[in-house]
Amino acid sequence: MTNLGDKVWRDLKPDAQAFDEIRITTVPRFKESEMSGDEWRISAKVEFMRNGNVMFERSYRNIETACNHMGAAHGEACDDGKAMFGGEGDICDQEGCANLATVTYRKKFGYCREGHKSDLHNVTIRKFCERHKHRGDCGLDDADTNYEQLTD
């Protein structure tokens, strides 16, 4: 990559979310007890994931209880510092993609939610894999016309 100096900022992912996948699965276990007898019991496990990795997990009595506590679990995961909204290492910045980035783009301008354009004070970059390197022309911030390619 071209020498960009010390002030390189990895921008937030487009449409950034804390996690890109949440799984709820049942967890069977065999309970043995001489007093109450033996039986299979089933609990539920919730996993908050990003780029294919489990970032936070919590167990519940059953699926219904897990569903009823999803908002609180999401808040707990974020409070525990497990949430990530920006780019990570050499992983693609497309939400839900765990591929290695092959292209680095420098953003030309910043845009607020209302569409106002602003100059960037630091070199601001995003990275994408081969599949997601074409960004389209619908948005302002995350559009092919707002990027200058730095690497191939």
Image (tube, rainbow, N blue to C red):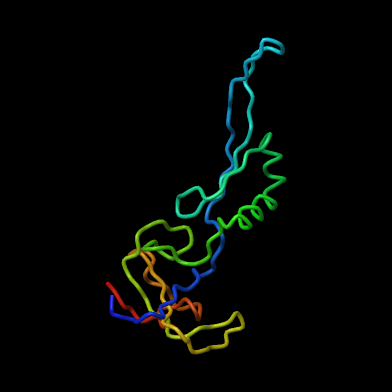
Give the side of residue 62 with respect to residue 24, left or right: right
Vertical order, 71 against 93 (above or below): above
Q: Where is residue 7 in the image (x, y as percent from the top left)?
A: 41, 80
Residue 71 is situated, as x and y percent measured from the top left of the image, at: 69, 53
Residue at image coords 46%, 49%: 53
**Going by the image, does 43 lie left or right of 96?**
right
Residue found 43% across the figure and 58% down from its top: 97
Quadrant in the picture for the N terminus: bottom left
Furthest residue in direction top, as rendered: 34
Judged left or right of residue 66, residue 56 is left
Q: In which quarter of the image is residue 103?
A: bottom left
Where residue 89 sits in the image (x, y, percent)?
A: 39, 63
Number of marks in picture: 0
Quarter of the figure with residue 58: top right
Vertical placement of residue 68 versus 8, above or below: above
Percent x, y of residue 26? 59, 34
